Amino acid sequence: MTTSTLLLITAAIAMIGYLAGSRRALSLSGGRSSSMHSRPGYYGSFVAIWSALPAALLLGVWLVAAPAIINSSIRSEFPAEVKAQSQASQGLSFGMIEGIARGMRALSAEEAAQAERNPADLRNLMGARGVAIAGDPEAYMIKAANDLNTMNARSNLLRNIAVLLVAVGGAALAYRLIAPRFRARNRVESVILASLVVASSIAILTTVGIIASMLTEATHFFARVPAHEFFFGTVWDPRFAAAGATASEGQFGLIPLLLGTLYIGFVAMLFAVPIGLFAAIYMSEYASQRVRSITKPLLEVLAGIPTIVYGFFALTTVGPFLRDISSQIHGLATGDYSNFIQAQSVLTAGFVMGIMLIPYVSSLSDDIITAVPRALRDGSLGLGATRSETIKRVVLPAALPGIVGAILMTASRAIGETMIVVLAAGVAARIQLNPFEPMTTVTVKIVSQLTGDLEFTSPQTLVAFALGITLFIITLCLNIYALYIVRKYREQYE
């Protein structure tokens, strides 16, 4: 029985428990709902919860614990010469055992016995079933694969029996507890409240886990490279060390990457904020309902386009266009038709990223402006102000906290962009202020440092975590500043 089938059976038991609990509550009430503490639906929900929730928790624990126990047991049976190897080699051996185990499940009992007696036949037998394995298996691998299949089968059987018994037992126990004065509603609402708390905690725990993982690896990096060389260095040249090297070769200056991140983000915001804000003002204050119903969805389509598509657009269209138009302008002015705007440049990446960010600014700002009370507009217009004066002096100041939050959220999105920068701005880590030249960002270097088969033991790889925690701190500072602005102007306009 597969896990999905087991879940469906558990859900069916919970549904039956709900119907049985509701019917029992109705029969105990004798047609008078006032004689029961809770409505019949709460009694049914109580039975369903006690049949599904413990069973689901047991299933989850089993799915996590059983594979770990089985894998540990299989590894403990490895020959001494295999145990003496490195963890990576043992992991490769265990991976091959898992592949053999999957293939042996497709063999008959006679074929499996033949393969165990003669390991050389296993590859041919599995090949006939369309299952390929890498290399020739050893005798201990075939035995371990058989043991793995046997232990998994027993574990699955015990799991199915245990989960179904818990589901049925929970439903029966909850069904027996139903009584006129039983506080079913309180019990059900307590479970719902606990589930809401767990759901709310997931985001917090995920954030804590991300920060902890980055800090751990970043600490290992700063143990090898001094912090002042990283935060105040002006040269980025990691120079990947050879395998087994322990020296922290290369230079890991953050300044070129940070400058490129902020510069490209600033150029993108120069394009996105005015256009997005003016589009939001038009849609919320001037456009008719029909125009708004057409324009807003079309504008928000831009937010659904994958960023790699924007990168292709920048690489094949915007970059060459800016390069060619710059050469024409330069040629008409000086007679020299060499281009002064590179195809990959800060301007190209900023322009295309700004197009991508327009829906974020416009949609959020439109919702915020629309939420401004109508009474403020009517009061301003009643005092003789024009529509434009009302927007400038009443609506926008009232919506300013939300607009600032939307802009800073957009800035965080710009800082974290990768694919557009890779294709439109290049990977050159440089310190320069010419928007017509290529630069790169922190996110691009995080990707490049973690590309390939690498071990997290060298500074060249660990620096990616130091870059990640730096981006996190920058985003946190933006959020803190946004909160300050929102509180300041909210007190002024409330």
Image: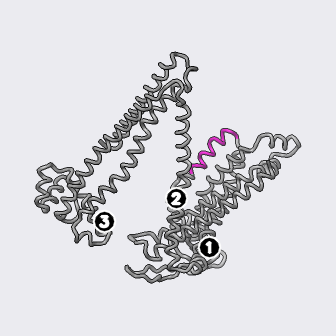
Relative height, residue 394 to residue 228 (above, below): above
Query: Which numbered disc flags the more N-terminal residue, 2 or 3?
Result: 3
* Identity of the residue drawn at 21% across and 67% down: 79
Q: Main secondary structure of the magenta part?
A: helix
* Identity of the residue drawn at 52% across and 72% down: 219
Q: Mark 2 points at which residue?
A: 307
Residue 182 percent coordinates (x, y): 52, 28
Numbered disc 3: secondary structure:
helix
**Quadrant that contains the N terminus:** top left
Task: Give the magenta-colored segment's residue range.
Answer: 288-301
Residue 430 percent coordinates (x, y): 57, 77
Confirm whether residue 480 shows in the render.
yes
Real-space Cα separation, disc 3 to disc 1, in angstroms: 42 Å
Disc number lying in front (3 or 1): 3
Q: Mark 1 points at which residue?
A: 259
Magenta span includes 246: no
Q: Mark 3 points at which residue?
A: 91
Real-space Cα separation, disc 2 to disc 1, in angstroms: 22 Å
Relative height, residue 316 to residue 361 (above, below): below
Numbered disc 1: secondary structure:
helix
Query: Which numbered disc flags the more N-terminal residue, 2 or 1?
Result: 1
| Disc 2 + disc 1, Cβ < 8 Å | no
